Amino acid sequence: MSVNTTEIQPPSQSFLRTIMIISTFGGLLFGYDTGVINGALPYMSAPDQLNLTPLTEGLVVSSLLLGAALGSIVGGVLADKHGRRRNIIHLALMFFLAAIGCTLAPNVEIMVICRFLLGLAVGGASVTVPTYLAEMSLMENRGRMVTQNELMIVSGQFLAFVVNAIFGVMLGDAGHVWRYMLVVAALPAVVLYFGMLRMPESPRWLISKGKISEALQVLRRVRQSEEKAIAEFNEIQDNVEAEAQMGKATWKDLNLPWVRRLLVVGIGVAIASQCTGINTIMYYGTQILKDAGFSTKAALIGNTVNGLASVVSTSIGIWLIGKVRRRQMLLTGLAGTTLALFLIAMASMLMQGSPLLPYIVVGLTVMFLAFMQGAIGPILWLLLAEIFPLRLRGLGMGVCVLFVWITNFIIGFFFPALLSNFGLYITFFIFVAIGIISLIFVKMYVPETTGRTLEELESDFRNYYKNDVSV
């Protein structure tokens, strides 16, 4: 029997909004913990603090990224085994403990260890939160709901830049000011932990584990009518039963021709998104602006413009998700970021020493972030959450996000050396060349996923790739 949709729609929408807000605190922590090091490093490096050398500075930055690479794989496996909700709860606890550890670190060794643990949480969240959102959302709103996590990531980075600027300007003379910057990350972790205790588990995961009544109960809470809840329940159950006949998901399943092709697509998009050079700005933006001609405090303040640009651009990108096809947004974003990097390289080469250069660099990084965060960022996590079948979603997405973090780690670790040995413009010309290769890859291999349910996508991919002799 159907239920009056007028009466049910408001509470279902309100509950979905609550689920989205609470779970995406994982994205906020992701953003804050990756962005805060941008402003903390100059103070942390002082002789009376951790006395960082160029090598240990790179280790402090990249240890989080190495942990995130491992966390993306482990997080995906644990999300499939124990559930999306429970995994996010455990990640919140790890976020809190690691943030406190970084804040109290007495030396470089402890800092690197705690940053690595923080990375495990960041990597786990980068897999689990988008998967959870994709499986809780309505098909027609899935794009916007999943990409809210990207908005929270850039909001976390913006928050980190603002906190860095405030503490840097007000308490910059206090050597331990970096500890205040780092401890702020513990607060959202508390919200995430207690908030997720009240959230439901993914109905798709519940059905996959045979918890039928619980899954139906969740769908009735988050769908606009009894009819929609029952229809989606039947579709998911049919899909799960079909997959159950193939046995438990293993690493060998990733070598199935059609899955392997999707895995290559996912890994390619993951690498392309990071090779834009986005995280050179997120981790070393202060240093880039200093090299362009700003003072340390002016660079910290200038960096907040980048953070604000990211938030505004991501908001626009989320609005565009429902109006522009995924693949077209990705191509447009890559074209825009590549052009922005080319202009930064040209300006740095032709205007070296000019007092106008730092302001031009700020303007061009805002242009870069408009394309990156308005098109590439939202599409990355959405595509990775969409393309894999339910049985392999956690594992497949985990592998792809592993490549996000490995690429991130390589760029984060070697960028200071590139900047030191080759200078700003040659370094950015390298990213321009990679951007052109990324454009070609997306144009040739990335499929369109707009307007189809997760189950429809799986069926289409199976039927298409099983007949593709090139796989």
Image (cartoon, rainbow, N blue to C red):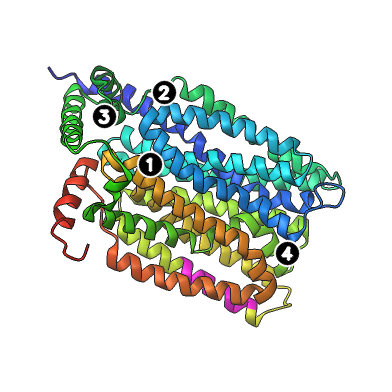
Quarter that holds the C terminus: bottom left
| Left or right of 53 on screen, residue 378 | left
On screen, residue 154 above or below 223: below
In the current view of this chain or complex, which residue is farthest to the bottom? 350
> Which residue does the numbered mark 1 point to in the structure image?
146
Q: Is residue 387 visible?
A: no
Q: Secondary structure at mark 3?
A: helix
Dot 1 surroundings within 10 Å: few (below 14), some, or many (20 or more)? many
For the point 28% across and 18% down, the residue is 214
| CA–CA distance in space, label 4 to label 1 | 35 Å
| Vertical arrangement, residue 330 with respect to residue 432, above or below | above
Residue 415, percent across and down? 62, 64
Give the answer, above or below, for where 96 lies relative to 469. Answer: above
Question: Which amino acid does the dot numbered 2 rest on?
Answer: Met
* Residue designated by label 2: 199
C-alpha span from label 1 to label 3: 21 Å
Do tag 2 and tag 3 residues touch (Cβ < 8 Å)? no
* Disc 3 packing (10 Å; few <14; some 14–19; many ≥20): many
Distance in Å between CA atoms under marks 3 and 4: 52 Å
Position of the N terminus by quadrant: top left
In x, y percent, where is residue 337? 47, 66
Secondary element under disc 4, as helix, strand or loop, is helix
Mark 1 or 2 closer to N-term? 1
Callout in the foreground (3, 4): 3
Q: Is residue 235 above or below residue 462?
A: above
For marks 3 and 4 on the same chain, the one whose residue lies earlier in the sequence:
3
Say whether disc 4 or disc 1 marks the residue closer to the N-terminus: 1
State the residue position of label 3.
208
Element at badge 2? loop
